[in-house]
Image (tube, coloured by chain):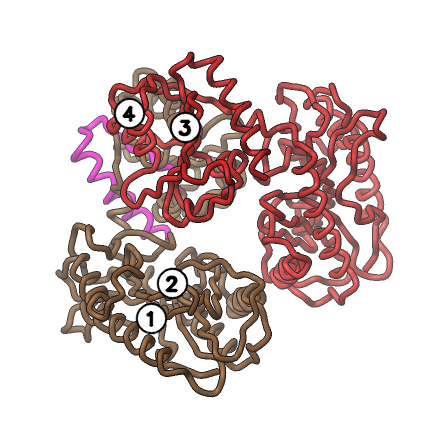
Chain colours: A brown, B red
Amino acid sequence: MSEVHVTRRARLRERCEAQGGPAGAALITLPANIRYLTGCAPAGPAALLLTPEPRDVLLGSPDTTAAVTDESLRGSVLPVTRGDPAAAAGELAAGAGVDTLAVEEHHLTVARHRALADAAPRLRLTGLACAVEQQRLVKDEEEISALRVSAEMTDHALGELLESILVGRTERHLALELERRLIDHGAEGPAFPTSVATGSHAGIPGHRPTDRRVEEGDFLSVCLGARYRGYRCQIGRTFVIGTAPATWQIELYDLVFAAQRAGREALTPGTEYRAVDRATRHVLDAAGYSDALDPSTGHGVGLEFREDPRLCPDAMGKLDACVPVTVEPGVHLPGRGGVRIDDTLVVRPQADGGPELLTITTKELLAL
Amino acid sequence: MSEVHVTRRARLRERCEAQGGPAGAALITLPANIRYLTGCAPAGPAALLLTPEPRDVLLGSPDTTAAVTDESLRGSVLPVTRGDPAAAAGELAAGAGVDTLAVEEHHLTVARHRALADAAPRLRLTGLACAVEQQRLVKDEEEISALRVSAEMTDHALGELLESILVGRTERHLALELERRLIDHGAEGPAFPTSVATGSHAGIPGHRPTDRRVEEGDFLSVCLGARYRGYRCQIGRTFVIGTAPATWQIELYDLVFAAQRAGREALTPGTEYRAVDRATRHVLDAAGYSDALDPSTGHGVGLEFREDPRLCPDAMGKLDACVPVTVEPGVHLPGRGGVRIDDTLVVRPQADGGPELLTITTKELLAL
């Protein structure tokens, strides 16, 4: 893994040098960005200093620095037991002759930024913007493999649940059981809080499980994902409880399914983010559900559960190959319930067979 | 609950007026602080604007503003679907004739602070420091009741686990089972990630459960807590697996127990935070374990899992009555394991019977 991280840091350094000149350096504090660049998931506040020299230093709690496995960083870790690692990094940079330091202003608080400025008053602080997040957008094959494993675990956990008796069990219990099964299959944990929604709750995005029990005739929607090596996928499915779905349930399901398929089929390199959202949204809009819709119909996944790109009407940018995203439309009818269908896919050129579906659990409407 | 929140906001407003003058206002963005002042747990970024008028406004996602149950805030919520609620609050304050706005610089990022300044350029931004956290330090009886319930749930969950077979099960599974039991007993969820550590892992603070299985002769240390109405307690216990503990296990356990008792007995109103830490730490130091010790031996609990006060050597301040804290010394011997014993207690005057122990599971060394 070391080499991967060295390469990633080199790419970021080039970018910083292009912006900050020969005496510019960058300070990374966002945990997922530190993990991407070092392989180390920080325990508590941490800071990665990239200097042009190049000599990169990871500063953090003794727990963080002790957990570094990246050979290239061994000997370049600095345990900080008192005060802010970002401030300590500032002192270090100033001492090394750095004159400009680009920081993650979307992550550093005003107070931490001030502590850094106070610790290194001669250092000019600029913004790194979301340079690391942009670099994280397109995944390498190692990252996609991790996502593939996380999707397999998720499919298994969901498949097992479907074989068990559901009627009479609460949303909370089903969510916990799904999380236990994820771990049984080797996940580090859930990628995000597992959502189980039944009856009138079904179809609410990000519904937090309650003590409501599954009943005959309910829509049941679940949304879960495994975390594997830090990578997080997402699957969402909706089922009907009982022997046969009602007509309105079949119609609503077919509609959301058609919207989700339209979104999946729009996932080609070069397509605008907003065009993918429009493809999905148009189907639901045309059926008169524009008011019931979420602000976005999908998002990127990776070391964070929700990352760029956002698939929504005002998103700027175009899809690249090897970008994993979710396509997750849903409709919720207050008092009645609703449907959500979420998949995680990797954008691939048509020549390579088009989008790669990672979450392969069936999307037929199952009556359980 | 409404009245409680109105009173809390009034107290904070008085403090702000004392500092910011008649045209000063405060902007609260830290989620636990918003919950303390409104009863509403924000979904996503949110901002609570306290103006001297007094007219308080809660800004946040439609999910957040829809969840407001506080009567006194009804009609004073503003759903924000685009951009930062903090920036929207700044515009609102400027429009209402506010000239100084105190913000939570330890929570707002540099980028959000700039968005706020850009949205309301004539507003003078100052720091609120940790005014709300300071107000949260001493709990009212309603808060202590919530902590008491959370401790009961935690004791029950732990008690049930001790009645089951432990040998052969993994740390991960035991942690999940504890979390399931917390929810069975009515908890909203775990107060923090449940830690289960066996064998050589036992006694490591905040150990993340692995696939290591419980074996005969192991020390097994667990640390868990329930979340109830947002309030979080903590209990930690260490057990021995098998028929009888080894001599070194008994000795180490007795030592940590003595340290923990010394800490508990030091919990009287007026005692310095550092004196409580010293009482605990001294016992372990005197036995030669100074290197194996954590930087702190306890902390406050409430709406956040770790809050003020910190019980550590450089903490400034003195205990008040009605402050709930943990006392949680531990010793970990690399390669062998170790012992942790954690309780949550409420500081009470001697006249009222001294510290109130919330987590009542036995601290005898049990062989399971």
Image side of residue B11 versus residue A229, left or right: right
The amino acid marked with disc number 2 is Cys
Q: Which residue is mark 1?
A: A358
Comparing labels 3 and 1, the label whose residue is closer to the camera = 3
Relative to B266, say whether B360 is above or below: below
Specify whether disc 3 shares its chain with disc 1. no
Q: Which residue is mark 2?
A: A233
Nearer-N-terminus badge (4/3) = 3
Where residue B336 sits: x, y (%)?
Answer: 71, 49
The residue range painted magenta reads: A1-30
At horizontal 39% and vertical 60% (from top left) the residue drawn is A205
Quarter containing the C terminus of chain B: bottom right
Q: Which residue is mark 3?
A: B27
The amino acid marked with disc number 3 is Leu
Residue farthest bottom in this picture: A243
Chain that bears disc 4? B
Relative to B179, say whether B16 is above or below: above
The amino acid marked with disc number 1 is Leu
Q: Which residue is mark 4?
A: B95
Tag 1's secondary structure? loop
The amino acid marked with disc number 4 is Gly
- Label drawn at residue A271: none
